[in-house]
Amino acid sequence: MEMLLTLKCFHEIITIGYRVYHSYDLPWFRSLSWYFLLCVNYFFYGETVADYFGTFVQRREQLQFLIRYHRFISFALYLAGFCMFVLSLVKKHYRLQFYMFAWTHVTLLITVTQSHLVIQNLFEGMIWFLVPISSVICNDIAAYIFGFFFGRTPLIKLSPKKTWEGFIGGGFSTVLFGFVFSYFLAQHQYFVCPVEYNSETNRFVTECEPSELFQLKKYSVPLLLQAVLGWETVNMYPFQMHSIALSTFASLIGPFGGFFASGFKRAFKIKDFADTIPGHGGIMDRFDCQYLMATFVHVYITSFIRGPNPSKVLKQLLVLQPEQQLNVYRTLKSHLVEKGILRPSLRG
């Protein structure tokens, strides 16, 4: 599904480029654009396969070569496309060809790279996908409702219908929604466990001992709120505190993805990216804020959440040569003995 959405978004933006720059007389260049899409997808999906399916791949000799030299193969494929572009330059179309070359690469950055980050977020646990994407949808709906009933003050010229009342009301509603929605999702192992591939059963599994983020803890209620709520303590999941950060981004920064899309469409005098969804435009019209949100979630996880992953370390150890595994064992044993965790072995 993610791949299909990426292909559709890429097609919508590339088509606009050909229409704007009147480059229909260069049909071969469209094929080159799709070739670059193939190269970038091969690179990113190959990275995902190597990262999460390493043990499975190492058992298939025919795949070991592709994984071992994956980045070199990806770069070679891209270089082939780059050379084809240079060799295809025609004097009367220089500017047009470089326009489309740049347009293609920016489109790849917007669509394929963000799509890869969405997949990375999914592997961290479904909750890291559902809460952000739902927060963006909630903010969109809440901002429309507040703007419709209370909107008086224009927010930004790029979107004349957006109002400060809708922006503020949508923001508070989104934070509240994310906080409550996170509480319900955090109770279920299916949503909080990282998605891992079980090479023995050849299937994905979401079974684990939930981390501290998804275990109820008792928090003290601030004094100012104790008089209102009548509670001194409250039981919450630590993830709910992170949901506030995610929801705040979705309500404060997320809409700027929509503003950017509005400015883009105004610049090229188009109403929608496409007519894929009757009455709603194209896929990009629906996902303009989601891509920005996906990047933030990935950066947030890597900066504040993710730590050393024992399962990934173990997978890497299992594919080492026996001599290398013994060296790692001796080094680890020596380190644990020095720390006093293990007793030195006695040799008689």
Image (cartoon, grey):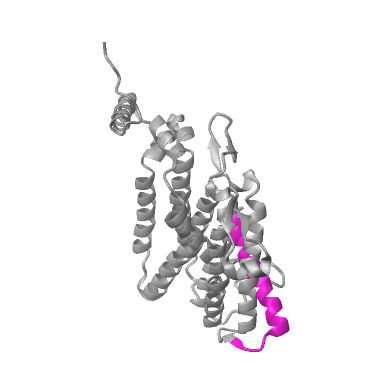
Is 135 contained in the magenta span? yes
Comparing 301 with 203, the one in front is 301
Residue 148 pos. (x, y %): 71, 82
The magenta stretch spans which residues? 129-154
Comparing 180 with 291, the one in front is 180
Q: Is residue 70 left or right of residue 113?
A: left
Residue 125 pos. (x, y %): 56, 48
Which residue appears farthest toward the top when viewing the image? 348
Which quadrant holds residue 338?
top left
Residue drawn at the location 60% of the way across and 61% of the way down? 133
Comparing 249 with 336, the one in front is 336
Q: How many marks?
A: 0
Q: Is residue 333 visible to us here?
A: yes
Which residue appears farthest toward the left when viewing the image? 348
Q: Give the answer, above or below, for where 243 lies relative to 252.
A: above
Residue 339 pos. (x, y %): 31, 34
Q: Is residue 94 left or right of residue 219?
A: left
Residue 164 pos. (x, y %): 60, 83
Task: Pick the quarter of the image with the C terminus.
Answer: top left
Q: Is residue 285 visible to us here?
A: no
Residue drawn at the location 55% of the way across and 70% of the way down? 254
Comparing 320 with 17, the one in front is 320
Dominant secondary structure, magenta:
helix
Q: Give the answer, above or below, for where 339 lies relative to 274.
A: above
Q: Is residue 318 left or right of residue 272?
A: left
Q: Give the answer, above or below, for where 54 lies relative to 117.
A: above
Is 272 contained in the magenta span? no
